[in-house]
């Protein structure tokens, strides 16, 4: 007796309906181990996530978990329902972090389908979802819109007319969430590792984060399993042989976290990733590639009612096997330099003087 | 002055006596880190082990550690005394899990030699042991019979007549241990990830767990070190060159845990591995192999005095570099399909309606 | 607008001044996860670090973190300021461990420049620093002198006359620190894994630790990131192609921890590394190398006022792709056997009868 429908093959394009609400499986309690593994996987050195003492000195109860770890866990939960049959991850918008996550918190995720648009070739379509991650108290820890191209199960399936949601091109500074209780008056630059505060950065300033870090297949699979992300392209070398790349693909979020960790050299005081305005996984990363990164300051914004913290809008580019002293990015022909793998427009919070 | 007997070379066949009691070294306190690493190593997604909130909703104090992690830690402790000089791991029987293990619990292990039978070639023999893992309160967490073929130090050594213990061919459902306090009335299928409960499975039903996961040498060594398992075949690539396989061998338990994690797709509600009836590591797994799995329901059993939980006896087969849609297993000639690496007959607990 | 000095290129030889005090960045709270990862990375089996119950039986509040983990974390903090531009790590002296470190403790590090001596070729010089690691109460957890050869930024830079500090050739037994509250009267040999106590070792005795363990690139990068050690030679395979080795180099501390873990077989009761007298990373270790180790007892010392604990001074040699039954070390020509990668003279504490 063969399979009687016990396994999930994930949703295909024609399975989604605009307005549909999806509760994702496997709530997960994050612990001190996730904090340590985040250090071990990426080498992150931000003091706020490394030291309970430092975190308490700025008004938090203890070291919060890395903002990107929260991202990875929430997005991982959505994969079996949203992107198991994805052709490509197309974009992020209105991507904000809410209350900080601490060891012991349990995260859950749910999504609402915002829009659907079939591709002209009828074999796939674009799905827009708003996903929300919450802690055990129901507080929002992360809220974002993501769109992915998803295969149709049956090209002949007839689908509803296109609904394309409008998303903001950037998160407004007034919408950035500053953790409750945060008080940077006693912020310790020496412990944090840099004398450079919000005032010291200029719009247009570029920073080469200098170092590179090589990704092994074992590394990216380890992190992606930790996030309970089941996207098959990351884990199956046997099936990978028959894909267009001929091999496994590293989870794009692994590259984001590596670039963020590298950016410590230049942004040591950027203690919080507050929002993504836009992000694109420009090219694939494979085991053996070495990731470098550089950043450009796009905008500076004070935050309403705060004298101690300001926001920097930063475009961070990651490139593989290509040190970033020559700022690889978009070229004059509008195409990306072939080494670029990530282009991320995001808001960072820094202490002010 | 050379080695004066400070190092242990492990026990050889002629060192064992029937009735001998062995206390294994290195009690180990398991923590939240072991829980997180179990996720990171295998990608396991069972809600009971992932979420303290989910665990509390079914009457447990917090998320228990993965049942197979308990197995790995207990068996790891026995290796230096029982199987350091093993030729092969032959079988498991009467293999039961006892009280759940929680972060903070300290596990110890002891074994009793049940039987011994020299092989006709006089170079090795089979050793049967009953091993018991206990927590810091002395409560049984795991109890099993295992038999291994162990080298003789000296083929000329004369040994006692064979004693071959009888072991049960299966664990009786009435002997399966349901954790104290467990109450599945509020069991949340959405959080657990499947609507399929005990009643929904049929004897003879086969489930292909679909996905595959590639094992890197770094991965299996990482897990096996975590379990403080010292079997040399897993760790030494230099010596591995001169073995019949010409390389390191992955710890068989790594494959069991991978197959269990893959089985989430089809058995998301199988919240507890309660017993192994029989298990065989049919073939070796090496770094680079991709593991797939499928299962067949062998038997369904209600549990005495319980309306909320039932047991499924399941045969799970893992195969390497071979997706399991065609159910690789024993072939008509009685031999296994060459891709099969694991054949495990075990009892799972699931919620009833 | 290019880089405006936000990134650190580390200190070069001419940046250091004798007497200079440096506070290193990123205090780090160590947790149970660091304990588990230490097991997973090296396979360490010492009962004191594995079991809270065992630790309590000898008077400690719970299992302390592995002594070498403390070393790795402290030395990792010093890298961005001291050795980012190092040519080579030359030596260690007066290297002592202080109060034990427990999960929840936050470690910080500071250094004082003790000496400076330019090399005759003017392209580099030797920097001696005393570094101190402290916990959140300001208690010393580790105190050592280390000297490294560091590049000059500008060979033409004129530097001060040489100051070469005197360091002790060995730590005196009376300076070894026994953890407060330690009481070995109830020490359990069976749990610890060996009947051999301090009295059983003889000066001149050699012990082959037998097993080998293969290092993968993924493994040594994982540990080195965990310690937030940023030395580029360990992480960047792309840049590594253009180095004299043509590849990444494993962090030398990874080899120390592997050798220490292997030394369990022979020194299971050596529950604490109390001091390094001298240490040298004799040769490089790369991904794929298999590490073996052997030890020689150099000296035995009772400890003042203690009947329950004694010190063994041990020279431990690690060699790669070379089992150590033939004691590879210094050869008759004064050079090391080509397989040797580590020569470490250190003090271990063991229970007495």
Image (tube, coloured by chain):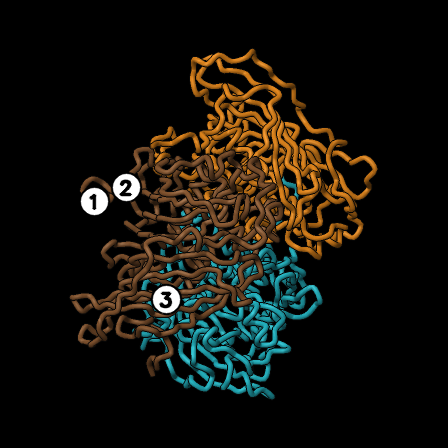
Chain colours: A cyan, B orange, C brown
Q: In which quarter of the image is residue C288?
A: top left
Q: Which of B19 and A203 is in front in this view?
A: B19
Question: Is A98 drawn above or below residue B277 in the view shown?
Answer: below
Q: Is residue A139 shown left or right of residue B236?
A: right
Q: Residues within 10 Å of mark 3 (few under 14, many from 20)?
A: many
Q: Name the residue under label 3.
A: A292
Q: Tag 1, which chain?
A: C
Residues at marks 1 and 2, CA–CA distance in whole angstroms: 9 Å
Residues at marks 1 and 3, CA–CA distance in whole angstroms: 43 Å
Q: Is mark 3 on a helix, strand or loop?
A: strand
Task: Tell me, yes or no, if residue A13 can be seen here.
Answer: no
* Placement of the N terminus of chain B among the 4 image quadrants: top left
Q: Which is more N-terminal, label 2 or label 1?
A: 2
Q: Name the residue under label 1.
A: C334
Q: Is residue C56 shown left or right of residue B3?
A: right
Question: Is A221 drawn above or below residue A260 in the view shown?
Answer: above
Q: Nearer the viewer, residue B233 or B1?
A: B1
At 64% from the left and 47% from the top, the residue drawn is B65
The mark lying in front, picked from 1 and 3, is: 1
Q: Residue C329 carries which label?
A: 2
Task: Tell me, yes or no, if residue B82 can be seen here.
Answer: yes
């Amino acid at each position: 007796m063969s399979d009687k429908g016990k396994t999930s093959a994930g949703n295909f394009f024609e399975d989604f309906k605009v307005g549909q609400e999806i509760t994702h499986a496997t709530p997960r309690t994050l612990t001190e181990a996730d904090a340590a593994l985040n250090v071990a996987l990426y080498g992150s050195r931000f003091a706020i996530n490394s030291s309970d003492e430092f975190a308490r000195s700025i008004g938090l109860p203890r070291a919060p978990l890395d903002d990107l770890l929260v991202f990875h866990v929430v997005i991982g939960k959505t994969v079996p329902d949203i992107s198991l049959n994805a052709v490509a991850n197309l974009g992020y918008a209105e991507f904000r972090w809410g209350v900080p996550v601490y060891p012991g918190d349990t995260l859950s995720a749910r999504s609402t389908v915002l829009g659907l648009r079939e591709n002209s070739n009828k074999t796939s379509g674009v799905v827009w979802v708003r996903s929300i991650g919450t802690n055990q108290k129901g507080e929002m820890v992360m809220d974002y819109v993501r769109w992915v191209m998803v295969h149709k199960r049956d090209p002949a399936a007839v689908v509803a007319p296109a609904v394309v949601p409008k998303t903001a091109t950037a998160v407004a500074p007034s919408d950035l969430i500053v953790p409750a209780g945060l008080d940077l008056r006693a912020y310790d630059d020496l412990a944090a590792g840099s004398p450079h505060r919000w005032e010291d950065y200029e719009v247009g300033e570029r920073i080469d984060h200098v170092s590179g870090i090589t990704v092994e297949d074992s590394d990216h699979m380890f992190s992606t399993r930790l996030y309970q992300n089941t996207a098959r392209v990351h884990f199956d070398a046997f099936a990978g042989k028959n894909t267009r790349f001929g091999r496994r693909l590293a989870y794009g979020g692994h590259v984001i976290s590596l670039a963020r960790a590298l950016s410590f050299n230049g942004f040591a005081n950027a203690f919080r990733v507050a929002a993504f305005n836009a992000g694109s996984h420009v090219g694939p990363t494979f085991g053996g590639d070495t990731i470098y990164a550089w950043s450009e300051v796009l905008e500076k914004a004070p935050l309403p009612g705060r004298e101690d913290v300001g926001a920097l809008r930063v475009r961070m580019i990651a490139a593989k096997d290509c040190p970033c002293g020559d700022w690889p990015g978009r070229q004059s022909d509008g195409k990306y330099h072939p080494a670029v793998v990530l282009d991320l427009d995001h808001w960072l919070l820094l202490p002010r003087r």
